[in-house]
Amino acid sequence: MTRIAEVPTTTAGHTHCPYCALQCAMTVNAGAGHAPAQVSPAWFPTNRGGLCRKGWTAAELLDHPDRITTPLVRVGGELEPRDWDTALERVADGIRRAQATGGPDGVAVFGGGGLTNEKAYQLGKFTRLALGSRLIDYNGRWCMSSAAAAANLSFGLDRGLPFPVTDLPHARAVLLIGANPADTMPPFLQHLDGAAAAGGLVVADPRLTATARRALDGGGVHLRLRPGTDASLLLGLLHLVVVGGHLDPSYIAARTSGFDEAWGHAAAWLPERTERVTGVSVAQLERTVALLAEGKRGHGDPACSDQRCDAHGGSYVLTARGAEQHADGSSVVSAAIALALALGLPGRPGNGYGTLTGQGNGQGGREHGQKADQLPGYRSITDPAARAHVADVWGVDAAEIPGPGLSAFELLDSLGTPGGPSAMLVHASNPVVSAPDADSVVARLRALDTLVVADFVLSETAALADVVLPVTQWAEEEGTLTNLEGRVLRRRRTATPPAGARDELWIWYELARRLDRGPERFPVDPRAVFDELARASAGGPADYSAIDWDRLDAGESLHWPCGVDSPGGTPRLFLDRFATPDGRARFALDGVRPPAEPPDAEFPLLGTTGRLLAHYQSGAQTRRVTELATAEPRMWVQVHPVVARAAGLDDGDPAQVVSRRGSVRAVVRCDEDMRTDTVFLPFHFGGDGRANRLTLPELDPRSRMPEFKVCAVRLEAA
């Protein structure tokens, strides 16, 4: 649900939504007396005055009764209130104990894609300098890593959308693969209205989602593929592009490399084979390719001499988590990029490939150092030149910066094991709900000597902690974020935090002081942190060096890279060349790999997971908002009526969904539009309703993304 309001942009109270990467603009109006704060929409290019129900209700959490406003320390098995000095000393003691026995890597850090750029940068710096540990990763590993790996391989650069979202309304054809923005970022859907109205919106999803219905309502296509067959589908489409005469040979010759090898993979995916594997009909495959090819023949195609073309046109291929959260997720995205390259879309005005970033700062969060293998500016931590540059900014010898650490699940899986970390600091994340094979993650967290969680509510992960540190929320902090199109935005303080809450920058400074690890290196002023971040990013792929808060506060629209060579920013990437050494985009296909866990007689169904309109991520925030919790109060499982009856169940019955790793209690929702081999579970709920108790941690070899979207399950009565 998106509510549109024509509200002019203002400076006073102007900020951005705390939820998804669309980063809708809003104002927060403090209530008079004891009245709660209220949110109003603000006009911005990404949301054009719209907010979804999550955005409209975001202010309810600012003074929620569940808000943690004083540190909590575990005493005798129970969390009890303590003052900040006591809590921080307990944390410091835990760090000292862990490193006395396990060395610098005795302590691990887990971050989040909701942290501001300043905090993501400072967290990486704090881990590597104050703790001396290489063990840091974040929950964005489970969000954008497959798309990032594939984009870096093909384009030499990873930015979710390499073009502004305002380019999309002109498109006549858009292929969405594993994306349901009608529920996940509703204001984005208006940018697809042009394609939908032209009958050119194609949605590839195992479910008939609200986005797929929008496509069908406009005369478009819903590709209801079998879960885990995304790569096969895309190679089948690529095959049809070639044999159907829709290849762009001049573009391929001038701007790409590796097509012949790619065709070696796609040639075997005949339409009939693709239909047999994916469940998508040959007719739908052919129509999809025709729509993309026809859509391209318009605005932005210099080879088009058709006088019927007008100022509108173009085609886009967009991926999201449904396609990417697989053990072959990077291969799926590489196949999507290959399809776009074969049609000649990337780097051509009015056309392109992109991925829909999920978390609020999912883009900036992976650029500045909280990822296991990266340094600020999206630099590789193993690159000697990158290490030297960042070390110079930090005022240390490059040898003091540790090497790469472990990816998110591998890091969690090492906790409390022989030789593994015995202490962990968790910021802006709730892995008890969001991690795959969630019960095993709980066991690893319980094995720690010291678990520290910084949060503003008692999430499922915070409830296991030895120390809980209450932190400020989105409307109570200053900083920047980077949205799905690489646009750097200002988050402004529009509300006063509770007296007991503290900013993470202050926490890291205080810990560095208590540990005698150079606290002066960790300023608490976010503007000073950003200025240092800009210097550290200079010359890197994600160059922020020409950006400062004054420019952002003046209303400038600045997309990275924004440095010496591009002081005005770069809203559209790749127009002249790609970021590879030879300037060419690479076709980077490999073979199709089936899901790691196929169904069998014991577990005959395919379980898949996703998001709901009412909730966000692990649900720790949205499950506490009255309107949202009322709309979706409890866990459910969506199944075809035939599947329910086979298990002796009917609509509304309590059920259990069981996999080899655990079981989930859920209420049955029958839907005749569901595939009969598939069950769907939302992943926002806690307790015995955690969908990720079912999922398996099979990891993508390139991105280290777990296999979230397919696992073998059975349905039975509760």
Image: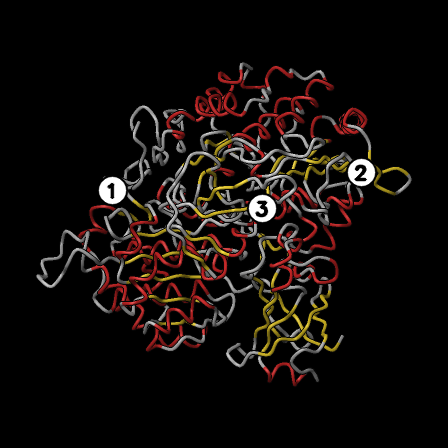
Density class for disc 2 (Cα within 10 Å; few <14, some 14-19, many ≥20) is many
- Mark closer to the chain start, 1 or 3: 3
- Mark closer to the chain start, 1 or 2: 2
| C-alpha distance separating marks 1 and 3 | 40 Å
Residue 171 % position (x, y): 27, 58
**Amino acid type of disc 2?**
Asp
| One can see residue 372 in this view | no
| C-alpha distance separating marks 1 and 2 | 52 Å
Vertical comparison of 86 with 46: above or below: above
| C-alpha distance separating marks 3 and 2 | 29 Å
Residue 575, label in figure: 1
Q: Which image quadrant: the C terminus?
A: bottom right
Depth check: 356 or 252 in front? 356
Label 2: which secondary element: loop
Residues marked 1 and 3 touching at CB (< 8 Å): no
Disc 3 designates what residue? 59
Circle 3 or circle 2, nearest the eye: 3
Density class for disc 1 (Cα within 10 Å; few <14, some 14-19, many ≥20) is few
**Amino acid type of disc 1?**
Leu
Q: Residue at x 29, y 30 (%)?
A: 568
**Quarter assignment of residue 608:** bottom right
Q: Residue at x 91, y 40 (%)?
A: 76
**Quarter assignment of residue 462:** top right
| One can see residue 67 in this view | yes
Label 3: which secondary element: helix
Residue 39 % position (x, y): 52, 46
**Amino acid type of disc 3?**
Ala
Depth check: 22 or 274 in front? 22
Disc 2 designates what residue? 466
Residue 266 % position (x, y): 35, 63
